[in-house]
Amino acid sequence: MKDKAFNRAILIWTGLVYAFLFLPIAVIVFMSFNANKYGALPYAFTTRWYVKLFTEDGLLAAAGLSFGFSLAAAFTAMILGTVTALGMRPLTPSWRGRYRRFISLPVVIPWLVQATSILMILNFIGWGRSYIGMFLGNTAVITPYVVMLTLGRFSDADDNTENAARTLGARPVRVFFDVTLPKLVPGILSGALMAFIMCFNSFCIQYYLAPFGVRTLPIEIFTLVRSGYTPDMNALAAVMALAAAGVALLLNKMGYSGKKLMNM
Amino acid sequence: MSYLRVEHVEKSFGENRVLKDISFSLPKGSFLSLLGPSGCGKTTMLKIIVGLESPDKGRVFLGGRELTPKPTEQRNIGMMFQNYALFPNMTVARNIAYGLKIRKRSQAEIDEKVDWALKLVKLEGRDNDRVTLMSGGQQQRVALARALVIQPDMLLLDEPLSALDRKIRVEMQYEIRSIQRQVGITTVFVTHDQEEALTMSDAVILMNDGRIEQWDDPWTMYNQPASVFASGFIGKANILDGRLVEKNGLLTVEGPGWSFPVNERDGFKPGDAVTVAIRGEHFHIDREPGPGAVPFKIKDTVFTGSVRKINGFMGADEVQLVALNSSEAAVYAPGQELTVSTRPQYVHYYARVETR
Ligand SMILES: Nc1ncnc2c1ncn2[C@@H]1O[C@H](COP(=O)(O)OP(=O)(O)OP(=O)(O)O)[C@@H](O)[C@H]1O
Ligand SMILES: [Mg+2]
């Protein structure tokens, strides 16, 4: 019966962790509908902040910029990352392991450090803070996600599906499109999604590299918070939480169906 | 008339010499097994035939034409792999149709042939099933159908049954052989299971460490093993050290506390040190000592179902006898003393090799 008590304790603990993770989000959604400007009680329901968000703010424009920018960077990372992963395929497992660890460095090294060094390089070649610089810098730090998640789809040496296709008469290019690519697609897509999220979030890189006066969403929020918090940011946070939940659901579903598709 | 001909094939991976001067051939429509322990180069040999590896030296011919310069996709050789290698993103029917699609056959022809293949492997009506949800045996049937539907010039099977459990495996052995006969396709089957090789094949090639150890029909392979390795790998013979002597005008092999008359062999004479191989089931167990019988003391017995294995000492050597599970065999008990005898044709001997 000790087990039962122990299990219950663990369950309560799990509940607490979930509360810790999700309470802030719940509070912010709750407050985004509160009329009081300073987020104070008593609670009075309003959709004013949403109206403000979608009509007068710079926030929405910044969100749009961030979205488009991240989409472009993630797409580029997807192409670069997939090609890189494919290039690592013929390597022996031990060399592939070495490259994999090496390419994960940009994920591990603090972005602060990377942003500084990228800025130095950009200054050196005369581009300085610019869209192209921000784009290159961001793409560089998110590409490893695509590479790693795509590499994860490479199956063990025992997988002979490509060989089987060749014995059935398919030339190498055909084998690639009929067998190799479908096998990698779930990895490529989840890598790209991950890259998108990371790019969308990367305040640090963008703060360093964005051209003066250009505000991506993280920069805009940072600036607003410094000058004083306003409730329309709650509204934005709520909208973003909803969008992110959608993405998470999508990711999950893709991972799941990807697994179902490929489990042999 | 040989259909497949492999001539002096050599292959190394770095320092590792995997195939050492391999030559063999087989006639059209026949079923050959490549048998051997793990790592002896069986898969590499198949890959060279189908073109997934290229030999360092040597050539491969099929129907009189040289295969070696052609890429895999132009060889028209069907292959089945150990782990099925089905396309997980395609249904059963699309898996089977793949080779025909590549060949740009009409949809009507594809449908007809896929139906034929499904019937052949007894999977009628399973066209739209997901291959990933099928059992191992069913997946292997799909793989066989997929390989045969393109009407290949030859079929290669790389341990296709080793991932299946015993019952389905035996079923599939029978099925593969009967389909092979029905289609009349020349087949090379790779296995490390000697029983499987003996059961299924017209001919067996026993490989060891990149060389051909013996190439014979199953009966000869079992009854006249060409080497100590062959007697140990095919069935499990008792391997003993002995010496040839002449006794009462008969060539006899003698060990510590036992001796049996043997047939003469070229290159051997009395006085030679030899390694002797005698299968457990080739001993005759006698209650009453007859002429030429050797004393045998039982250490223990193991019941395995159809046979009873009897471990004990023949003179100073420990051997294992195999007796059919009869009421007679049931009374054998540890400590019991019997005598055993055998016939000259069952006693194989080879130049002495150090086995232990
Ligand atoms: N691509 C390769 N690169 C390096 N070594 C290889 C390669 N393929 C096979 N080998 C080596 O060649 C030897 C023979 O391998 P092969 O796969 O032909 O053996 P096998 O007889 O099929 O064994 P198993 O019964 O285990 O499948 C092994 O030592 C293996 O490690
Ligand atoms: Mg093998």
Image: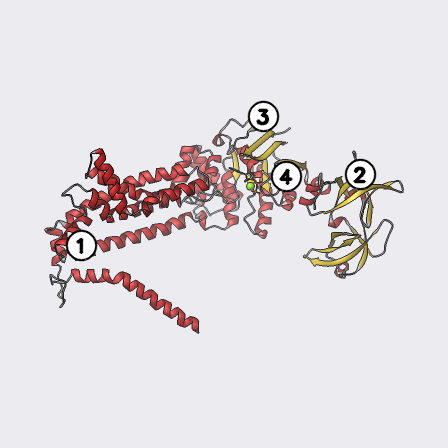
Do badges 4 and 2 share one subunit? yes
Label 4 or label 2, whichever lies nearer to me, is 2
Q: Which mark is residue A156?
A: none
Label 3 or label 2, whichever lies nearer to me, is 2
Q: Do the residues labelled 3 and 1 touch (CB within 8 Å)?
A: no
For the residues labelled 1 and 4, the Cα–Cα distance comes to 71 Å
| Residue of label 4 | B208
| Residue of label 1 | A236
Which percent across, then down, holds residue B350?
75, 39
- Residue B98 visible to an observer of this rendering: yes
| Residue of label 3 | B64
User: On what subunit does the disc labeled 1 rest?
Assistant: A
Q: Which quadrant contains ligand 2?
A: top right
Amino acid type at mark 2: Asp
Residue at (16%, 46%) from the top-left corner? A215
Give whichever of A165, B300 is nearer the camera.
Answer: B300
Which percent across, then down, holds residue A150?
37, 43
- Which element type, helix, strand or loop, lies under badge 1? helix
